[in-house]
């Protein structure tokens, strides 16, 4: 099955890497899509899973504060992180993780390789140390939490 032109390689990509319109006010580096990363993805023949933005899904585009862009970035990021650690946000994030994990598990079950790239804005290395294929079951979910490093303290299982 799936013996057509597919590369069978999937890269998890943060929503904000592909869509700079989704980042918090005052932090966009591109007017829309990040052309450098998108070109590297196209040139590498990698499929992607665009992970949902927990900040938008929990707090909205304005991150529940229309004046957030007027603060220093570190102050605003700390405020956002504190909001994401509240119980209602944790529930939403856990639901988002379930949806992404369903996709990861489906790809792996069907012989695909799933990888992640974190904090390498240039995407100089498309294959990062996060290889979800080598994990299984609940350890794959914990591994996903480690990959995202969102600061959510609730146990994944």
Image (tube, helix red, strand yellow):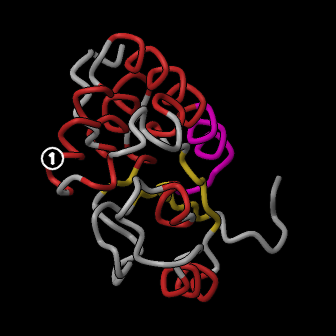
- Residue 85 is situated, as x and y percent measured from the top left of the image, at 27, 22
Residue shown at 60% from the left, 89% from the top: 43
Q: Is residue 39 left or right of residue 137?
A: right
Image: 91 above or below 53: above
Q: Residues within 10 Å of mark 1 (few under 14, many from 20)?
A: few
Residue 21 position, x and y percent, is 55, 62
Residue 119 occupies which quadrant of the picture?
bottom left
The residue pinned by badge 1 equals 75
Look at the picture and state if 157 lies above or below 57.
above
- In the rendered structure, the answer to whether residue 78 lies left or right of residue 57 reads left
Q: Main secondary structure of the magenta part?
A: helix
**Mark 1, secondary structure of its residue:** helix
**Looking at the image, which residue is at 49% across and 87% down?**
36
Residue 109 colored magenta? Answer: yes
What is the tally of numbered marks visible in this picture?
Answer: 1
Q: Residue at x 40, y 53 (%)?
A: 24
The range drawn in magenta is 102-113
Whether residue 9 is in magenta: the answer is: no
Image position of 132 with respect to 2: above or below: above
Image position, residue 147 (x, y; %)? 31, 46
Q: Residue at x 58, y 74 (%)?
A: 33
Residue 29 lies in quadrant: bottom left
Which sits in the foreground, 4 or 89?
89
Viewer-side residue, 120 vs 104:
120
Q: Position of residue 127 (x, y in %)?
A: 39, 70
Task: State which quarter of the image contains the C terminus.
Answer: top left
Task: Depth check: give the residue in front, 83 or 149.
Answer: 83
Horizontal side, residue 130 vs residue 76: left or right: right
Query: 137 and 90: which one is in front?
Result: 90
């Amino acid at each position: 099955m799936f013996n057509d032109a597919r590369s069978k390689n999937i890269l998890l990509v943060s929503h904000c890497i592909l869509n700079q319109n989704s980042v918090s006010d005052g932090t966009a580096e591109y007017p829309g899509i990040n052309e450098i990363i998108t070109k590297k993805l196209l040139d590498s023949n990698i499929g992607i899973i665009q992970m949902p933005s927990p900040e938008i899904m929990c707090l909205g585009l304005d991150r529940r504060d229309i004046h957030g862009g007027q603060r220093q970035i570190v102050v605003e990021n700390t405020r956002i992180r504190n909001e994401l650690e509240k119980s209602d946000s944790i529930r939403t994030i856990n639901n988002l993780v379930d949806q992404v994990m369903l996709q990861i598990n489906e790809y792996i079950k069907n012989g695909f390789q799933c990888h992640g790239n974190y904090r390498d804005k240039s995407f100089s290395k498309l294959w990062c140390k996060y290889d979800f294929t080598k994990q299984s079951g609940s350890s794959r979910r914990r591994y996903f939490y480690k990959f995202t490093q969102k600061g959510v303290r609730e146990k994944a299982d």
